[in-house]
Amino acid sequence: MSHERRLLILAEGASGDPHAGKTARGVLRYRPKEVVAILDSARAGERHGEIPIVASVADALGLDPTAALVGVAPAGGRLPPAWRQLVVDCIAAGLDVESGLHEFITEDAEFATLAAERGVDLRDLRKAPPGLNVPTGANLEHDATVVLTVGSDCAIGKMTVSLELDAAARRAGIASEFVPTGQTGIAIAGWGISVDAVVADFIAGAAERLVVEGVERGGELLWVEGQGSLLHPSYSGVTLGLIHGSAPHLYVLCHKGGATHIDDNPRFPIPPLSKLVDLHERISLLARPAKVAAIALNTASLDDAAAAAAIAAAEADTGLVADDPVRNGPDRLFAAIHAATPLGPPPP
């Protein structure tokens, strides 16, 4: 899009939901200056910080948005039926529309016809680019240091950890790049490939392409956004493809403090973090053995005392530095990771 990006985030009924509204919340946290309004009729009249929440597309037009972003991630990645009119209203108002759903708006005849009539762009953040294939070996031939976030479960903050550590690296004067691998990361960074929408055989090749692009963008330290979990019965495949395709030098193991089972399902217990450290190090690409450098905990559901106890327990179990980079800031984690890279300890 050639014009300045001024976003209306579509978050009807989900602006306060940390899971269903995670795309909206991610952009609001990391690109708030691009957002002019949030659409959620259930909270119309409220504000998210300085950003107004409106009831309709018409109510947002006075704030001069240039594009609308579908800010929800419903199960299955399908557009909720009640949302079709929202998208139509946006296109009719002359707004470009960005969507991270598995159901592609560019392939919807009604949307595409109206967009052509109104001269607006439709963008599917999850749509894989053409020409993907298996890795070529370029993932082993660059000079950057690659750090991949992995997790004990899905939706526990791997993207957030990557972004927080990227910000810490930039503050330290390092040529750092966040490498987006999911729709929310792409919405934030403006580039990337949503690897969960890639043909399984080509996930590793897509991850390699992303790493190469991160290097071409000037990154000497790359933070690859993790997806899924090796433990998850539904989404382990995308995790393994990312591991072998991005060929990381280091991992950051992410875990939700207090969690004991995958998706709270008693059939799938989460083993001790020390065992997860060993699992990821053993399953690394043979040509690029990688070590877990630190443990990133999501302690949002814990009070201060319980969060401190969870961090201390993770350190005792693994012998690695552990912290919550949102609650306590990323600097302690970043120092431990930086010291494990060829760059050596960070400056004081």
Image (spheres, helix red, strand yellow):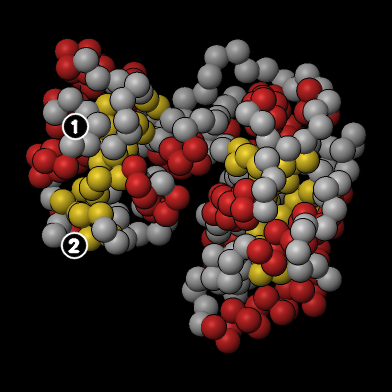
Q: Are marks 2 and 1 in contact (CB under 8 Å)?
A: no
Task: State the SS at label 1.
Answer: helix
The image quadrant that residue 215 belongs to is top right
Q: Which of these two is toward me, 172 or 336?
A: 172
Q: Which quadrant would residue 105 be assigned to in this image?
A: top left
The quarter of the image holding the C terminus is: bottom right
Apparent side of residue 213 relative to residue 142 in the rendered image (left or right) = left
- In the rendering, which numbered label is found on residue 171? none
Task: Give the vertical position of 276 relative to 80 (above or below).
Answer: below
Kindly identify the amino acid type of the residue bearing the numbered disc 1.
Cys
Reading the image, the residue beneath label 2 is 46
Q: Would you place residue 152 above or below residue 244 in this image?
A: below
- Amino acid type at circle 2 is Glu
Return the residue at label 1: 90
Q: From this viewpoint, is residue 190 visible?
A: yes
Image location of residue 171, percent across then percent down: 62, 53
Residue at the image position 16 percent from the left and 42 percent from the top: 63
Q: CA distance from mark 2 to mark 1?
A: 21 Å
Position of 277 with respect to 286 (left or right) is left
- Which of disc 1 and disc 2 is earlier in sequence? 2
